[in-house]
Image: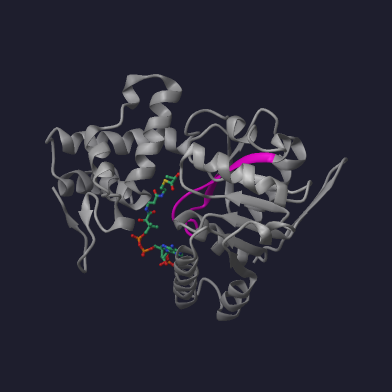
Amino acid sequence: MNGPVTIKNDSTMVDIKEIGIIGAGQMGSGIAHVASLAGYTVKLIDIDQGQLTKAVATIQRNMDRQVNRKKISAGDRDAAMVRITTGTDYGPLSNADLVIEAATENEETKRKIFQALCPTLRPDALIATNTSSISITRLASTTDRPHKFIGLHFMNPVPVMDLVELIRGIATDVPTFEAVKAVAVALGKTPAVSEDFPAFIVNRILLPMVNEAIYTLYEGVGSVEAIDTSMKLGARHPMGPLELADFIGLDTCLAIMQVLYEGLADSKYRPCPLLVKYVEAGWLGKKSGRGFYDYSGETPVPTR
Ligand code: 3HC
């Protein structure tokens, strides 16, 4: 296991030992999982106590699975679980060295979080956002420390996927970039640097493919099963695009397509009306029990 990281530079020393994570959804809990296993003290914050309880149970279950598959020892798991504490306000973040925001993909929500969070933080604390599409420069401008603000975009499932995207805002300084890059490496991830453009690299390429798969369904070119089988066996993707959409969350898929559509002002990014309809229906994919598949039984069943 890699340990916490100390970065020295000419102006400040950023000694990252304690990481705050805001949002205990699938990304926040995955980030808490890898950060605690890497030796960091983790403060996981969510306004919803029920969500925190669920997140801790998920982390425990996923670490149990890693123990069973001999990826980590039972001792590593137990020590990591002890390093995670939770809270429903920002008080526990008063001594955090780095806070990673992983709340819902909604700019207004994130703005409100940063405005409420900043007065609690130490002046030298760094802030990273796990946004999958929103401008880092714009989000940074809502904080009191744009130079200590950066994009750190994890992939789902966080414990399994090797990549993180690092995105500098216009004001992000070199010590912040280097410190957060070193944390990414300590978490066992390979960083890829992206410029601050809508949806960065992975989602700029991946989500239009997912959206096109939904158009393919919408236009009746193929069934859910035919589309997913085609891409799994015909393009060797680990998941079909519709299964992947359900896995990411259809609300998140729609939010990313809207950022691409509006941010790049190109009709080729128009979200498929069927995706919009599913989100309006509350069919958000795996997390809500229904999307392009129905998850209420033993195995997922295609809904079209
Ligand atoms: N925590 C820990 N380990 C996990 C895990 C989790 N949440 N989920 C799966 N695993 C592990 C399993 O234990 C297993 O380990 P092993 O190799 O030691 O046996 C391994 O991952 C494979 O899992 P399974 O055997 O259960 O299932 P699959 O072989 O079907 O793989 C998958 C599952 C890794 C999710 C694979 O289907 C996959 O890679 N899918 C594509 C995922 C993807 O594209 N993610 C990116 C989405 S885009 C994104 O996140 C950006 C965002 O902004 C939208």
Question: For residue 91, what is the image quadrant?
Answer: bottom right
Please tell me which residue lies in front, 65 or 93.
93
* Residue visible at 50% across and 42% down in the picture: 109
Is 74 displayed left or right of 126 in the figure? left
Q: Nearer the viewer, residue 282 or 223?
A: 282
Q: Specify the quadrant of the image occupied by residue 136.
A: top right
Residue at the spot x=26%, y=46% of the render?
242
Q: Position of residue 137 (x, y in %)?
A: 61, 30
For residue 135, side relative to residue 17 (left or right): left
Q: Which residues are magenta?
A: 149-164
One can see residue 37 in this view? no
Q: Is residue 277 visible?
A: yes
Q: How is the image coloured?
A: one colour
The percent coordinates of residue 177 (x first, y second) are 70, 40
Asked whether residue 142 is drawn in magenta, I would say: no
Residue 78 x %, y %: 58, 78
Q: Is residue 133 above or below residue 226?
A: above
Q: Position of residue 201 (x, y in %)?
A: 49, 34
The answer to whether 30 is drawn above or below residue 110 in the figure is below
Regarding ligand 1, which quadrant of the image does it lie in? bottom left
Q: Is residue 285 left or right of residue 226?
A: right
Count of labels shown? Answer: 0
Q: Residue at x 73, y 57 (%)?
A: 94
- Residue beneath the point at 35% across and 44% down: 251
Residue 271: image quadrant is top left
Question: Does 77 sit above or below residue 87?
Answer: below
Q: Is residue 155 magenta?
A: yes
- 92 or 125, nearer to the observer: 92
- Farthest residue toward the right? 10
